[in-house]
Amino acid sequence: MTQKTVLNPKLMHDHHRVLILRHLHFHGPASRADLARTLGLAPSVITRIVRELTAEGCLVETECPRSSLGRRPTLLAFNPDYRTVIGAHIQPGKLECALLNMGGRILARWEAAVDSQPDPKQVFDLLLKAVVALQRDNTLGLGIAISGLIDIRTGETIFSPVLQWERVNFREIIGQACDLPVHVENDANALAVAELLHGAGRHYRDFLCVMVSDGLGGGIVLGGRLHRGVFGGAGELGHTAIDPREDAPLCRCGERGCLEEFCSKRALNREAQRLGLADWRALGEAARAGHKEAERVFRRFGYFLGLGLKNAVNLLNPEAVIIGGDLMEFADLFLEVAKEVICRHSFPRGRTAPEILLWQVGKEGFLVGAGGLVVEEFLTSPIKA
């Protein structure tokens, strides 16, 4: 049973602060009158909280460009340099970290090589070094993006087939060591947060962000918030079944017929090997050069991706599907096929299909999204819906 939040003046005050900050972050500068009208708050409440936030440096004042005669209204804007955050992306062979402002701009970087399936202790030690090198007095927290199934209640990596980790928990020990709040999230969800805060997702309240890379991951945003499910397992698009045969390809999760066995670098590498090519990138270059069989492989890839996304679209009814990841380097070879399958088979026919968009944040989106986990927490009301 969900425990009810007991409202009190301080809680309402903090809630109103977040409403103002979140509106200015997502919608840009606005006047005090616009805030009162849009948020349904009394002008006196707006005045009091804006004075407080401006004194703290969280908001800045700017003038509206002159468009007519008369006095130009003073606009309020969210100050992206109010605080800093640290984002980390743990991946096979590399640990990437960055210091960012709250607008997602990278201020400093820190990188280190790790094993392709690194020992957690190695990564922990390097991560602490990165935090020491990057942390400033105004740093709000640390966000960590990891490929795998994350229990958001505990911060534990339950299982990462890419890193070959099970039951690894960084949140508590890293948090104690660096004295910062720590957020650990699946990397596809981190990418969705980056698109929500700073990319194509800013314009949508309901969208699916799909990462096509070593595996196939999905981040779901509903009502302008990341949807994680009960413990963080929502969005595992790559492990939905697409092939029911008993001898379907065996996925590294232990099941057969998973979508990512048809739509991932791993799937393309198998096809490249069959055709005597080095890897997925060589396969893509061959397809662009007119290699008919390589072209067919990518069309098939797009067909299966479209089928998987069609299922997700019919289930979630999103406004948009944002697709990113390493394999978007060859999007010209498969994306149109995927779009066609989604539009042709989404239910019900005749209704507007979701917009299919390329990621805007790019490869830095994992770092930006990891840091964005801290920003999203900062912009979250203490009053739970």
Image: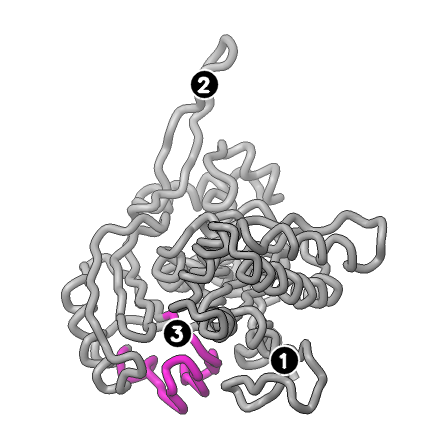
Viewer-closest of 257 and 290: 290
Q: Where is residue 3 in the image (x, y as percent from the top left)?
A: 60, 79
- Find residue 146 and name its label: 3
Answer with mark 1 or mark 2, whichever residue precedes in sequence.
1
- Spatial separation of the CA atoms under disc 1 and disc 2: 48 Å
Tally of numbered discs: 3
- Rate crowding at label 3 as few (under 14), some (14 to 19) or many (20 or more) other CA atoms within 10 Å: many
Image quadrant of residue 345? bottom right
Label ID, residue 159: none
Residue 381 vertical placement versus 66 (above, below) = below
Which residue is the site of mark 2? 72
Q: Residue drawn 54% across and 38% down?
A: 35
Q: Is residue 119 magenta?
A: no
Q: How far apart are marks 3 and 1 (CA)?
A: 29 Å
Q: Mark 3 or mark 1: which is in front?
A: 3
Q: Where is residue 109? Give x, y as percent.
A: 21, 58
